[in-house]
Image (cartoon, rainbow, N blue to C red):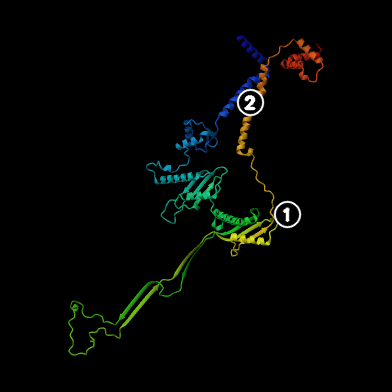
Amino acid sequence: MAEEQTQDNDSVVARFRNLSTNSRMALLFGLPLVLAALVATMLYSKEPDYRILFTNVADRDGGAILTALGQMNVPYKMIEGGGIMIPADKVHETRLRLASQGLPKGSIVGFELMENQKLGVTQFQEQVNYQRALEGELSRSIQALASVQSARVHLAIPKPTVFIREQQKPTASVLVNLYPGRSLERTQIAGIVHLVSSSLPELTPKNVSVIDQNGVLLSNEPDSTMGALDPSQMAYVQSLEQNYAKRIMDILSPIIGAENVRAQVTAEIDFSQTEQTAELYKPNGDAKEAAIRSQQILENANGATPGAQGVPGALSNQPPGNTSAPISGPGAGATNPTATTATSNPNASTRRESTVNYEVDKTVRYTKNASGAIKRLSAAVVLNHKTVTEKGKTTSVPLTEEEIGKITALAKEAIGFSTDRGDKLNVMHTAFNKSPKQEIEADPFWKTPEGMLLIKDVIKYGLIAGLIMYLLFGILKPAIKDLLTPRQVLQPAGTTLDIIEDSIEEPLSIQVQNNPVVDQVREFAKQDPRVVATVVQNWVKGNE
């Protein structure tokens, strides 16, 4: 048994030695290449799919994140731009675990800057730290928007002063870095402006500027002296025009069909504001109905009662004595002139003054007109010809004047047509061009991101498979076939020449490939071309 195995090994070695140089090189280098390609394919197929964990990681956060990933035994890759990639199945779990550790902290600091205040910090340093913390918190809030990749906020806070004339208003500027292909809407820009202005006392929205990474001013305030409209006013005008056009379409579509009417409305809006204060005074009315504001009565009497006389003092303060009737005097009913001090005095005078002030009937009226009043409307309506079917034939005929008049009246009522404002309405009827619309074709699958990714994978794996097939069937298979095919025992040269000569002298059949002698000669020529060359050389020299 051992002798047979030794003979087999000797035969394999002998066959390998008898192989041509190309076959030997194919076996020596082709087989390792095939094995290496198979191993690389297996390793590549087992490699997990990496996804982005974080992008634009700051340098001081990158080291902490990589250290944490190493402790968690999570493989990672660094990409250009400060990005970190990890296996796709561990992205969410790793983010949560890193978030519990406060990573990434980011280059933006907020109010945590105020937590570690050192003893002996000056008021200026404390104010600077507060401003930095406030700017950081605002930047974090703005970065919460889906379109904003990063943001920076700069606050200019003036020093407080006791002089009102020298008091300055604070200002702010915001720089937003947007994701590629993203943009901010007007409402989002207004939200950023109001967010910043509401975070600082006495900071008005007009003192907040917002720009993007390209230096484009996003929060442009219109110049009132130029009469320009701000974005909110333009949006109001567009909304109003669309609303009026929709009214016309809604009222006319059930009558002539939605595909047979088109309407456009242009509105002129007055955004100016007027404030008026008026004071109205009514004429004097009935005094009985009027309200008394103030009243003053003055009475003055002169000469009616003489003034006090005598020497002042204790003697003059004695009570008067008892009076007695005189022995002789006037009769009953008479009045003693000395006793009656109320005797009329021809020199006496009485004066009375009365002053009454009534409330003034005044009306103060304050009027402020709201902005956005409609100055004029201009509407254009286009109607298609109506379709009439007679005797199985469909034709298009124009609308009658009566129908156009009714449609015009309906359109006027829909938009609130006013001749006082100078509104205009133009109704036109014509045949519509019914050429087919060119629909936007969807991108083919191979142009979509999913298709491109699939094609990329197919090409990648196809090249690997093609290389392996070429190595197997183009190089190794012929070499292995030559190695495993037993070599035939060579006959003497004379016998071989006789066989060749006999085969040549015999008439060749049509199907030469089926002749075993020819096949044997071909195989012999492939195995030992030197012998064949010697035979041909003898033929040329004329030797048998």
The location of residue 354, given as percent across then percent down, is 36, 77
The kind of secondary structure element at disc 2 is: helix
Residue 323 image offset from top left, x and y in percent:
18, 84
The circle drawn on residue 468 is 2
Instruction: Indicate left or right for 217 with 486 as reference.
Output: left
Task: Assign the C terminus to one quadrant of the image.
Answer: top right
Residue 243 x/y as whole percent? 58, 55
Asked if labels 2 and 1 touch by Cβ distance under 8 angstroms, the answer is: no
Give the quadrant of residue 519.
top right
Dot 1 surroundings within 10 Å: few (below 14), some, or many (20 or more)? few
Upstream in the sequence, badge 1 or badge 2? 1
Q: Which of 226 and 344 is in front in this view?
A: 344
Task: Identify the image quadrant of the N terminus.
Answer: top right
Q: How many marks?
A: 2
Identify which residue, 264 or 511, lies in the foreground.
511
**Residue matched to label 1:** 391
